[in-house]
């Protein structure tokens, strides 16, 4: 049976919003130009991005209350204003504070609002289609930087970074505004009361948190050090570039495919498969192997990371219901923030490759245990 118009609007709203704000992850394309043009310290680009991710994570914690009070349409409208203002401020800024305020604070906040609302809308889709809906919504977030990565290198040399960011500000604000128009209006529509008042057991919350942290950390380690790892595995410059591209392609494909597949086999079996695939890929990359195996390993790691990113929101909604989802997932999402902070430190230790790379897979062990715990806990 085809999904109804209401379901289509929910998924379309979340997909459009995430496609727009996901362009935050293309920041590195313009960061050197922005920090040089605004007079910010030359090495501040990564720090601005880190601030944006921190703000993103903190804002997620308040999305549940925001939906209960204002509803998804108003929150997305606020995200549109914050995104447009942040990118516009950065485009026109003349001082070193511009990227910190524009991208780090305002665009980071817009990401937290839009992403939190988007996954909450996907959580409202009936359970039999929820995995596919979550996969589309979080897949769109990964697709945003892919699209911008294809366009920006061809456009920026001719337009300049200020014009490019100004155009992006209009596009992002317009797309998030469109998402707001598609979203339900009113607090009740965004935060349904059914099952929303049932307390969530701490053990369930802890297990979901552990699955996300442990399942995402290995992929983030490889993302943080993809090129050095490929070189350490003996790949040339062209093959190393292909490895990085396969990692990103796997991330997108994993988000889209895993959610759909989980509607058929179950959320927890799909999560267990993703964790196992990541472990096998790390084991293969830790030993001297040929280029084909290395490239396949990068693709599998990216796919597994994307799968975890799509499956955890759907699994959370299955466990707590759409009413409680926004506030619960805000807490679960902090696991990704913690994994993102730890990953660069692990990456520095593992960049040389070899058997040390197996250390990067150790977070998969508690994640697998957490999946087992969830399998023995009843749905709230």
Image (tube, grey):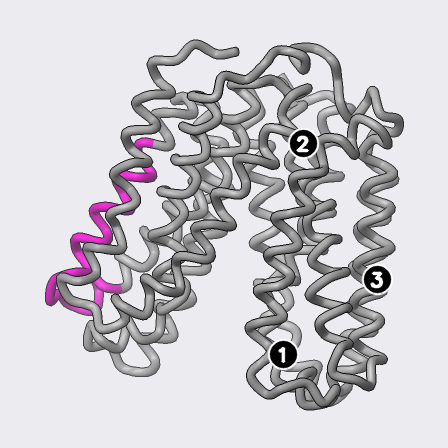
Q: Residue at x 40, y 28 (%)?
A: 207
Mark 3, secondary structure of its residue: helix
Residue 31's mark?
A: 1
Q: Position of residue 190 (x, y in %)?
A: 78, 26
The magenta segment is 272-294
| Disc 2 residue crowd, few under 14, some 14–19, many 20+, Cα 10 Å | many
Residue 84's mark?
A: 3
Q: CA distance from mark 2 to mark 3?
A: 22 Å
Q: Nearer the viewer, residue 346 or 127?
A: 346
Left of 307 or right of it: where is 96? right
Ranked by sequence position, the earlier of labels 2 and 3 is 3
| Disc 3 residue crowd, few under 14, some 14–19, many 20+, Cα 10 Å | many
Asked which quadrant contains residue 31, the reply is bottom right
Q: Residue at x 69, y 65 (%)?
A: 104
Left of 22 or right of it: where is 292? left
Ranked by sequence position, the earlier of labels 1 and 3 is 1
Q: CA distance from mark 1 to mark 3?
A: 18 Å
Residue 210's mark?
A: none
Q: Position of residue 264 (x, y in %)?
A: 43, 22
Q: Nearer the viewer, residue 358 or 302?
A: 358
Q: Residue at x 37, y 71 (%)?
A: 242
Q: Nearer the viewer, residue 266 or 225?
A: 225
Mark 1, secondary structure of its residue: helix
Majority SS type along the magenta span: helix
Examine the rendering and report whether any part of residue 16 can be seen: no
Mark 2, secondary structure of its residue: helix
Q: Is residue 22 above or below residue 115?
A: below
Examine the rendering and report whether any part of residue 136 can be seen: yes
Q: Position of residue 343 (x, y in %)?
A: 39, 59
Residue that numbered label 2 is attached to:
120
């Amino acid at each position: 049976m085809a999904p109804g118009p209401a379901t289509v609007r929910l998924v379309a709203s979340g997909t459009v919003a995430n496609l727009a704000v996901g362009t935050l992850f293309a920041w590195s394309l313009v960061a050197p130009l922005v920090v040089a043009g605004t007079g910010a310290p030359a090495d501040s680009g990564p720090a601005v991005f880190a601030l944006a991710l921190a703000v993103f994570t903190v804002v997620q914690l308040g999305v549940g209350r925001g939906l209960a009070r204002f509803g998804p349409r108003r929150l997305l409208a606020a995200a549109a204003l914050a995104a447009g203002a942040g990118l516009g401020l950065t485009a026109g800024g003349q001082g070193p504070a511009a990227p910190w305020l524009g991208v780090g604070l305002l665009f980071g906040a817009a990401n937290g609002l839009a992403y939190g609302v988007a996954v909450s809308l996907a959580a409202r889709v009936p359970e039999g289609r929820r995995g596919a809906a979550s996969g589309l919504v979080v897949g769109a977030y990964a697709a945003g930087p892919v699209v911008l990565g294809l366009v920006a290198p061809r456009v920026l040399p001719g337009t300049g970074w200020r014009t490019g960011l100004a155009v992006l500000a209009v596009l992002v604000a317009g797309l998030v505004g469109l998402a707001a128009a598609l979203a339900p209006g009113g607090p009740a529509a965004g935060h349904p009361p059914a099952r929303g008042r049932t307390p969530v057991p701490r053990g369930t919350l802890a297990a979901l948190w552990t699955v996300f942290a442990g399942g995402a950390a290995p992929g983030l380690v490889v993302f943080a050090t993809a090129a050095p790892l490929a070189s350490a595995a003996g790949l040339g410059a062209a093959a190393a570039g292909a490895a990085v591209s396969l990692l990103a392609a796997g991330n997108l494909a994993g988000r889209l495919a895993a959610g759909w597949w989980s509607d058929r086999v179950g959320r927890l079996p799909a999560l267990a498969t993703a964790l196992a695939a990541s472990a096998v890929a790390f084991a293969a990359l830790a030993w001297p192997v040929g280029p084909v195996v290395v490239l396949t390993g990068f693709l599998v790691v990216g796919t597994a990371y994307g799968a975890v990113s799509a499956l955890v929101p759907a699994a959370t909604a299955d466990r707590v219901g759409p009413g409680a989802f926004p506030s619960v997932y805000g807490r679960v999402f902090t696991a990704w923030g913690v994994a993102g902070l730890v990953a660069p430190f692990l990456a520095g230790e593992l960049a040389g490759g070899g058997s040390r790379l197996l250390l990067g897979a150790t977070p998969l062990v508690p994640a697998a245990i957490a999946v087992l715990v969830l399998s023995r806990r009843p749905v709230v």
